[in-house]
Image (tube, grey):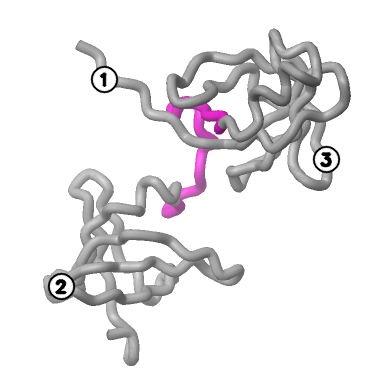
Amino acid sequence: MSEPDSFLAVARIAAAHGVRGEVRCEVLTDFPDRFASTKHVYGGADRHIISIVRVRRVRTGVLLKLEGVDTRNDAEQLRGMVLYVKDTDAVSLPADTYFWHQIVGLHVRTLDGQELGVIADILPTGSNDVYVVRGDGREILLPAIHDVVRNIDLDNGCMTVELLEGLL
């Protein structure tokens, strides 16, 4: 029996654009150039396949012409739909770089084995992300920097950290 497909959200349809069925999308990926080579996406809760006919990058996101969406009314019906790609079609990341969905849910422990909790959220700050670790009724904010994050073991679902002074 094969495992179910996993998907990554890459865009959300924000509005219809023009009268020929294009949709304006909010980009939900750090790699908006991926749309230039993406031939299809998966839409909605049922993840049905949708072919991309044409792509145009714009200042506010991306304009997509989707197969079978030929009028403004057709496009309006899609407002709010999230578009996905299979995780096997994800952009390749450099070494020691991870997607957020790989980090959220990891158990966090210190170098000496003290359990701190689980990564519940990630806050983008501009200079570096901050991991929100929840456990034992407390919340710890850990900067996602090499001085703090010492090891990420996705196979075992854990992150080992070194707490700098003032982090606890």
Q: Is residue 159 in the magenta section?
A: no
Mark 2 and 1 residues: CB-CB less than 8 Å, in contact?
A: no
SS label for mark 3: strand
Check disc 1 and give the amino acid type.
Glu
- Using the image as rendered, state which of residue 151 and residue 66 is in the foreground: 66
Find residue 76 and report its horizontal and vertical position in percent: 72, 25
Q: Residue at x 68, y 30 (%)?
A: 35
SS label for mark 2: loop
Find residue 74 and report its horizontal and vertical position in percent: 72, 16
Query: How dense is the environment of label 2, judged by Cα within 10 Å: few (below 14), some, or many (20 and up)?
Result: few
Find residue 148 and report its horizontal and vertical position in percent: 35, 74
Q: Residue at x 39, y 46 (%)?
A: 101
The residue at the far top in this view is 68
Which residue carries the number 2 mark? 136
Which label number is shown at residue 58? 3
Upstream in sequence: badge 3 or badge 2:
3
| Span shown in magenta | 82-97
In this picture, is 65 found above or below 148? Answer: above
Upstream in sequence: badge 2 or badge 1:
1
Which residue carries the number 1 mark? 3
Q: Is residue 94 left or right of residue 5?
A: right
The residue at the far left in this view is 113
- Using the image as rendered, state which of residue 156 and residue 116 is in the foreground: 116
Q: Is residue 84 in the magenta section?
A: yes
Upstream in sequence: badge 3 or badge 1:
1
Quadrant of image for the N terminus: top left
- Using the image as rendered, state which of residue 119 and residue 161 is in the foreground: 119
Query: How dense is the environment of label 3, judged by Cα within 10 Å: few (below 14), some, or many (20 and up)?
Result: few
SS label for mark 1: loop
In this picture, is 103 found above or below 163? Answer: above
